[in-house]
Amino acid sequence: MTTASVTYESALKELLELFAFEPDEIETEWPRIKKTFDIWEITAEDIVAAIERANQYYDLSLKGVRMILNIHLRELCHVTLAGEEKEKRIYTVMPCNIGDLITAFAMVHPNCYAGFPDFYCFLTLGTLFKKTGAYMDEAEKWFMYPGEGHCTCNMFRAAALQKKKYPKPDVIVTYSHYCDEAWKNEEFLHTYLGINYVTVDRTQDTPWEHGKDTINWRNLRFYVESMKQARQQMEEIIGLKITDDDLGASLMDTGYYAGLINRIVELATNTDPAPITFKDIVPAIWISMCGVMPDNRPRRKAAIETLWAEVQERAAKGEGPLPKGSPRYMSGGFAFVIDPLIPAFLEEQGLVCTCAEACYWMPNATLDPPMLGSPGLEPTEEFAAGGIGIFEMLGFGFYLAGIPNSLSARVQMVDKTLDNIQAGAYPVDGVIMPGHYPCRVYGTDSLVIKDVVDKKGIPNMALELDQFDTRYYSFNAMRTKLEAFVELVKLHHVTKG
Amino acid sequence: MATATGNQKLAQGTWNKLDKHLQTRILEISKAKKNGTKIIGVFPGDWVPEELIHAAGAVSLGLILGGEPDPLEASHSVLPRFICPFARAACGYGLVPDRPMYKLPDLYVDPVSCQSMRRVGDIYSYYLNANVFKLGIPHFPWQDDHLNYYKGTLQELAKTLEELTGKPLGDLKTSIDLYNRIRSALLELSQMRKSPNPPISGKEFIKLNHASLIGDPEVVAEILESLVQELQAQEVEGKGPRLMITGPCIAQGDWQTLDLVEEMGARIVVEDVVEGMRYYWRNIKTDGDLMDNLAKGYLRDRRLWPFTVGSTEVRSENLFAMAKEFNADGILWYQLKYCECYDMESFYNAEKASEKGVPFLKLQSEYQLEDRGSTKTRIEAFLETIGN
């Protein structure tokens, strides 16, 4: 399809078909999608480019992947139109560790939107349409001066709200313990735009090891209390309530979904050829973190079950995107958000990414406590007996999602993940660590994690880039480094014996 | 134009005594360590009650150096650039061989007031295999559950100190009294700068404050009290603009901006910084539950810091109130690069300054000596604006 020959309608139809919209769904959703795209100023040319990018970035022969991208687009519409479609709106922000608490409100109350708007904007407007840069420019003209390493996730939110691209929420739920800047951003949005916010707090003074027996219970209880207070404040502001059972249902639903992701990662790690590469799992992972609106809960279940069935079938047939015996690598740090071109390039060069460092994507792991809602598991009574209530599970869930509470915990996780993988049948030949440079929490660990990997004698490369902002990023500038990484990995694969 | 400090320092004898004490302080601490005394390195921000360390019979050593480019560069082998230069320098000082002070501690207490400071503890733990106690700082100090959490952490710190020293905590009240003497003396000295011709310059005061974090508290208390006596009702003539300096941190050794200000005849009459300096505006109560008093004093009874939730407006009001109280002609915002919360506050305060008609200059630093020329030009222009 060339832009010269295309109409807006034909381009959009092609995009929606690519993203697994059925014909009747295209008809039903068309007005909302068109309206959303008009608000974000997406043109026919943008859509044509997005189709090309989607084909370049993802293995779209997997229907499950296309169904996930379908959900991304639907969530973009939900948040963009939430001002006219919903009476109440609750947003959350990075690191979104109580996404299930937020989305439980939407699950119970049909007049409520709840979600993580920024991320769905990045996954669509950023990754596919490359339209987020202008908002970073706007934020820099406002209270986030350039050159200070402000988090572009926060920058986007500030500008998008200032420009009224998505509606003002009734409340933003933010966090003061993980990212120094997020809640400050919300405070400024309150000052300048009148947006309410509530804050979940904790202190990052203890490492949470992986196991019930090593949790710092004083710290966890403090965190739990903070989450409960946040819940109460949300309820007071929006005038809607949820019960602990509602939260449990939300967690169970996400737990089931995340549990299947874990199984897909395990299969990819332990099969040759790998039936799927990690870059095609990442879009699904972000959904588990960001939460979805109620109509998309059955869709995400269907999507992940479809994907699971597809990869199992491929594994049984000995099929995969790359041939048997291809060199493998692990992706550490931040999974690629706005530019999957890097993992796509590496795959083109013959490298397969089967796993990431983070916890529940950590293959061959025995999770303790087990993930709530994992297939075949009915944990609620078991956890209650162990003194772990639903809010404790919510607190654990953040950790289980792979964002550790301390550098020492992260080092242990990376160490354990690599030991597990290297002891398996298909060890990795390299580790790539895409950072997010303005992230003081996660991005500043990169050289330490590199040191951990170095000590295992595995070729590795840290990439410093901005996961949400491609204004100053050039793939071509990275290309030379990536080619060097490819050579190292291939050499290691051949010589490791 | 006479310089703020003048050529003949008032209370020269006492200043000399302090200089001599500081010159030999690190050697003294090394000897104490060899004799079995435990050394506790404290990263600054005034979150760590040194009273506990003193009561444990250990030596508290403020790790407050900064301003030098070389340790900063050294830190880039373990850290990316994008955290504040003070935190990076703190890591760098631990890595370079020519700063034995940073290798002395048996225990490092790292207050997790922000992600940058948290990272310092992480780096020491991972690369230097250091014994690090992370002291978590909750972000809602007015809430009792947050205060209780912080108090609980102080109790854990006390226990850690007892285990390290092998003996129970001594007389905490005596230790609190000692540090109250230090704070009271610093407050009196600081207040002298309200006068039209303060007997002490901004840099001198900041150096005294730093000295209180490194020196023997008994010696420092005595010296500060002597200075209070000697400088009371004294004046050093100066005509330059009076400035307030504010920012995340003024480290020991980070003198470039202060020197430039004073070289050009202006005077720093008050500062409001979160880290690198001791908070001296309140004392700790000595009646009742002392641990409770320490928790309240160090977490709650203090000016809010930028990482306290909802603090921007209150902090801004305090900033301008303090500037007025000290008759400052303008505000110098000393921004350390990549300190993102302070950077956001600079926007807010620049707006407020404009509304109030208060001259306001934001300077950014990454401890680079080559910034000197451009910084000097900007300060010059700022002072001319105030003069006009």
Image (tube, grey):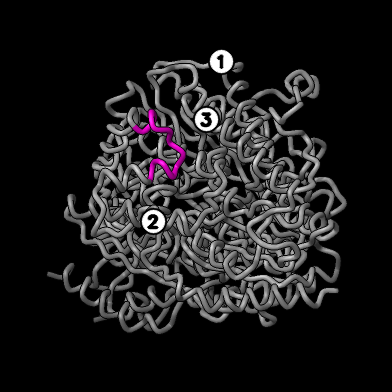
Q: Which residue is mark 3?
A: A299
Categorize mark 3 by other alpha carbons within 10 Å: few (<14), some (14-19), many (20+): some
Q: Residue at x 26, y 75 (%)?
A: B378
Q: Secondary structure at mark 3?
A: helix
Comparing A39 with A161, the one in front is A39
On the image, the x and y values in percent for residue A273 come to: 73, 57
Task: Based on the picture, tell me whether residue A19 belongs to the magenta stretch.
Answer: yes
Comparing A21 with B269, the one in front is A21
CB contact under 8 Å: marks 3 and 2: no
Span of residues in magenta: A15-26
Can residue B53 be spotted in the picture? no
Query: Earlier along the polypeptide chain: callout 3 or callout 1?
Result: 1
Q: Secondary structure at mark 2?
A: helix
The amino acid at mark 2 is Gln
Task: Based on the picture, tell me whether residue A317 belongs to the magenta stretch.
Answer: no
Which tag is nearer the camera, tag 3 or tag 2? 3
Q: Which residue is mark 2?
A: B191
Which chain is mark 2 on? B
Q: Which residue is mark 1?
A: A243
On the image, the x and y values in percent for residue B72 come to: 55, 75
Q: Main secondary structure of the magenta part?
A: helix
Question: Where, quadrant-wise, is the C terminus of chain A in this rendering?
Answer: bottom right
Q: Residue at x 80, y 78 (%)?
A: A495
Which chain is mark 3 on? A
Among all residues in the image, which is located at the extreme left?
B388
